[in-house]
Amino acid sequence: MVHFTAEEKAAITSLWGKVNVEEAGHEALGRLLVVYPWTQRFFDSFGNLSSPSAIMGNPKVKAHGKKVLTSFGDAIKNMDNLKSAFAKLSELHCDKLHVDPENFKLLGNMLVIVMASHFGKEFNPEVQAAWQKLVAGVAIALAHKYH
Amino acid sequence: MSLTKTERTIIVTMWGKISSQADAIGAETLERLFLSYPQTKTYFPHFDLHPGSAQLRAHGSKVVAAVGDAVKSIDNVAGALAKLSELHAYILRVDPVNFKLLSHCLLVTVAARFPAEFTAEAHAAWDKFLSVVSSVLTEKYR
């Protein structure tokens, strides 16, 4: 089970308070689809994903990015119990969506890069380390119910 | 996996910015690596790893300089990094998983310092390029 120190929690929640969830979710999901094009396999219904500008301008990517990151916000409210917080979503991703858990790690790293580009110097090495721990914890929680 | 012409242009352009802060970027990348992935410190028991240490700065410079060598010979990365490839295979023997971690930390550092230039397209090109560099460095492992 992932355990967060008080400093780590503070590093995470203080930055989260300043995040535009819609914008960051859009960026993170968009970058996933651009940088790792094979991840597009889950989004056949999204329409035009043929180029970086098509992907970043795609309204379905924007909407879905917001959904995903809003859910991530729930993780931040439940840092001490990620596995139970994400139990239902884990079952969904396994049984209905059939997503390889490797993808959770990739998306987590995209979110870290988006945070770095938004916050610059403020996203210093210590802050990054806390966020890496969080995205890893979320990835593990989302994979926990796989069978 | 090979780089397209567009990707090469993007990489070379971004390198122009990176090289202007090469040493600082090298040191910051390593700092991020050791804090986010403490297990990577096992390769440096002989180093003072405190932020700002002379060894960290020197080593960070070395790493970024090697990336620069790869950029300058972007049409022949394997040739440019042949000696380094042997070093990593026979002497250093850093587990291949760590190249991804280092690459990620370099990208985070670049994203933090050059957010406007680090577009999704630039990000994709650099991720691919660092993946090529990593492949070259592990190609002689077995």
Image (cartoon, helix red, strand yellow):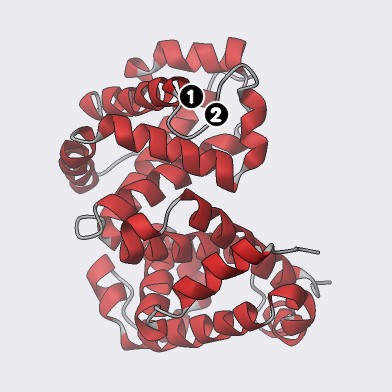
The image shows a total of numbered marks equal to 2
Disc 1 marks a residue whose amino acid type is Leu
The residue wearing badge 1 is B137
Picture quarter with the C terminus of chain A: bottom right
The image position of residue A62, as x and y in percent, is 36, 84
SS for callout 2: loop
Badge 1: few (under 14), some or many (20 or more) residues near its Cα, within 10 Å? many
> Which circle's residue, 1 or 2, is located before the other in the chain?
2
Q: Measured from the top left, where is residue B51 in percent x and y? A: 47, 35
Which residue has dot 2 on it?
A: B49
How far is the residue under mark 1 from the one under mark 2?
23 Å
Look at the image and tell me in which quarter the N terminus of chain A lies. Answer: bottom right
Q: Is residue A93 visible?
A: yes
Subunit of mark 2? B
Kindly identify the residue that appears in the image at 72 percent across and 81 percent down.
A86
- Please tell me whether residue B94 is drawn above or below residue A26 in the rendered image: above
* Residue B69 falls in image quadrant: top left
**Label 1 and label 2 in one chain:** yes
Task: Report the amino acid beneath label 2.
Answer: Leu
Q: Position of residue B89 (x, y in %)?
A: 58, 16
Residue B141 lies left or right of residue B84; in this view the side is: right
Work out whether residue A34 or residue B120 is closer to the camera in this orientation and state it: B120
What's the residue at 75%, 63% (across, down)?
A: A2
Q: Tell which tag, 1 or 2, sits nearer the viewer.
A: 2
